[in-house]
Amino acid sequence: MDKKLSPDGALKKPLISASDLSTADAEARRKARVPYMQNRELSWLTFDERCLDQGADESVPLLERLQFVSIFWSNLQEFFMVRVGSLTDLSLLKKVIIDTKSNMTPQEQLQAIYARCHELYPVEEQIYQNVRAGLAEKGVRRLEWDQLTGDQREYATTYLKANVLPFLTPQIINARHPFPHLENGDLYIIVRLTEEKDKKAKESRKKAKDVGAEGVTLGIVPLPGNASRVVKLPGEGFNFILLEDLLEANLQEIYSMYTIKHTNVICVTRNADLDATETADEGEEDYREHMKKILKKRARLAPVRLESKRRLSDTIAGFLLPRLNLEPYQCYVTSVPLDMGYAFALSGMVDPVLRAKLTSEPFAPAWPAEIKRTKRVIEQVQEHDVLLSYPYESMDPFVQMLREAAADPDVVSIKITLYRLASRSHLAEALIAAAEAGKEVTALFELRARFDESNNIQWSQRFEEAGANVIYGFHDYKVHSKICCITRQTENGLQHITQLGTGNYNEKTAKLYTDFSYITTDEEIGQDAIEFFRNMGLENASRAYQTIWVAPLQIKQNIVKKIDEQIALANAGKPCGLFFKTNSVTDREIIEKIAEASKAGVKVTMFVRGISCLVPGVPKETENVRVVSIVGRLLEHSRIYAFGSLDSSEIYLSSADLMTRNMDKRIEIAWPVRNADARRKVLHFVHTCLADTDKLRELRSDGTFTPLHAFAPAGEEPFNAQETLIKEAREASEAAHEEEMSEKTAFEKLSMQARDKRRKDVNERRAFTDLEEMYREALQHQIGGTDNDAMESFVNAAAKAFAEVEAKKLQTAALSGGEPVQQAPAPMPAQAPVPAPAPAPAPAPAPQAPTAPAQEAPKPAEEKAPEKHGFFWRLFH
């Protein structure tokens, strides 16, 4: 097939031939569709709509409602980058690929997606405007330029000149300045420019100002990444203007040599669905270097969506769309900010008293009640199995166990799979410390973890530098398993402490995602873990495991087998049942088997957060299937399979969703929950979630969901499962702590109380400041830059803390009459300076206008830190 390129370098989409999409063919495929299945992409859009519904729920605090609008925006952006991007690629193939659930071609799916999104954008606008109005009533006001007072305009203009214009790179477009590449997800202000027709006016402008280039009709201003999106303004309450609104109102200062006809804010979304194995040859090229090239290539892939603040004029649309190879139906106009990422920053910027009225009470994951705080975790897990339930319970005990393992002389090796890590990870640092201490550390990094590739590349380099054995998994399968094995030498031989998880080893998302982490010394599971890592090193997809199931050769096969057992029980008139908790269900073979179980009379409950290609309640097909979902404060992420009547069922926890990609194209694990205490904990979690009447919604046979609070009894307060589990975990932790304290001496109690007070103070301070970072970690899209990017904010924060400590020392010395020692100035933060906070009362004078940052004097050559020194030496010297 000939490949035709647009001016932007993107493949032009071919017209669909009659042989591909004749009306008769489409109708025949529609009639042949299985009635209890639906298209995964449209189901996903329904899930994102449920996220948006939280923004309309008046029982949710206003700032959190704004954050749900941001989550909807972020989800939709990734959806276009990945799913729409993938379908766009498929639509270019000569061979027509038919979706197995809905019998739709890629082009039909794209048409349905774009049409559905045109329905969702007005809903998002209405919800956003309602939330914005509600916040304004409470004193949090996003203002437009024409709403600013004189003092606010003066302040904003000065801020713009001092903190934004130095970073600005405005462009013009003419014969000598071609149309630039528009980066994925970045905001741009596009400017329609005109030249003076009146000769006298033109001559007057030339005398008064700079002379512009000839033949210029358009200008483009990229929004600078160095400047803050939220510009705080003086006035009562919390007033702010978004950077794009401030810039757009002052463009005449930038294009002073031209006449501005009109402006608009635009954002391009590009296809980011790249096959990392394509053209990869590990024999000729280091796999990590190959992934770096993939990341660079991703940034320049074809556009799939164009968003604008206002409707594009005919001139600008006629100029932009051909160059982006987009059609009008791929363009969306919205009054909602095109980048809603700022929503999570607001909680930390608003006055604490006001913030308390606009957010839920913050919570920190509780220390698990089953683990004592004053005893080594390694000793405790040898006494009994431990099941941690995130984020109700903290991930800290597992990280602490790794720290103990790093210093334990009996520990021989630590092996772990790493799919997603926090950009600043205590878990990773503990593993690096173990490697540096001489332990045999093997880390299997999955560099193809979408949108975390750059972060994983950086961490893998750190691990190699520390002496760890780093492997990159399979060529044909992503390694999505969450498993860690610590091997210790004991008097009785080797002992294996195995940790198995349903979610990632990411401390940030562990405060947001619900997951289970199981730690055991079970010898069968330990031997399976050793066998697992041996097979990973050999790229061997084996089924030779005693206890755990490993995809792609075991999980789907065993699920189907277990469902058949329940069908046999139903046919024999015996108690039976099925329960699955999963993020999504898309695998056709499993869906068909569940439908078969339903027709046999097996009651099936599906707890599905996201996509459900399975439609319940279809007569004679899925009448015995119930599909429910919870979208709430926390993100439901754990995977549970239960075979039999729920309370007496055989329970498995897993890293795998019921999706074809997880079942057939990834290395996943599932393991039985045989410990009685762990079983009770899982069952309590499931029963609590199913009893929810606040956030739980049920999928109906027509593909829609019941409304919020549909199951709440009239006149009663809805029951919120997540809030209940938060409260139960906190109360159990406090009770266990009190019991542990009762066994201590008076001195030990005072010491523990002081330590607990420090921890509590830190948690309270971080409750809101961590929120933005936590969500950004969970919703991350942007690919990182240099190797030092991940540490930059940490360096700045540490430098600031160090400077504060030194300042206090100087103040103390001065008060005591001592001679203060002169200290070198602390390093300046990398971000642009922000003006002093505005005073709250309206009559108060406006804050002093911000000034441009001073140039930092160059350091003498001899002060450069030698490369052999560590991070903190370089920071403080």
Image (cartoon, grey):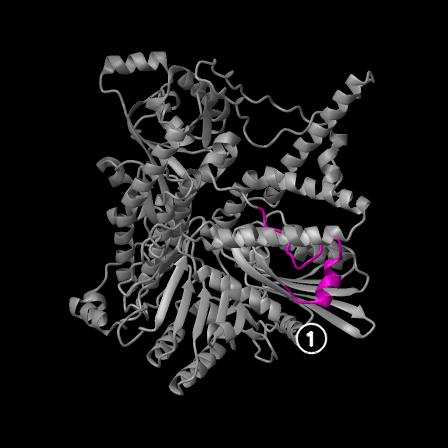
**Image position, residue 645 (x, y; %):** 46, 75
Q: Main secondary structure of the magenta part?
A: loop
Q: Is residue 94 left or right of residue 735?
A: left
Whether 433 is among the magenta residues is no
Please state which of residues 783 and 79 is positioned toward the viewer in this rendering.
79
Quadrant location, the C terminus: top right
Give percent across and percent down for residue 2.
31, 61
Q: Position of residue 282 (x, y in %)?
A: 58, 65
Up the image or down, 430 lies above or below 198; here it is below
In the figure, residue 457 lies in which quadrant?
bottom right
Residue that numbered label 1 is attached to: 523
Q: Nearer the viewer, residue 828 or 512?
A: 512
Amino acid on which the number 1 mark rests in the picture: Glu
Q: How many marks?
A: 1
Residue 307 seen = yes
The span picked out in magenta is 364-386
Say which quarter of the image contains residue 417. bottom right
Residue 288 placement, left or right of 181: right
Mark 1 crowdedness (10 Å alpha carbons): few <14, some 14-19, many ≥20? few
Farthest residue, direction front: 715
Look at 61% across and 54% down and name the residue there: 732
Which residue is outermost to the bottom? 572
Q: Of 490 and 798, which appears nearest the observer?
A: 490
Query: Which is more toward the observer, 717 or 730?
Result: 717
- Provide the secondary structure element on which disc 1 rests: helix
Can you give x and y, in whole percent of width and height, for residue 47 in the image? Answer: 37, 56
Magenta segment: does it hold 378? yes
Identified at 49% across, 56% down, the residue is: 450
* Residue furthest left in the image: 24
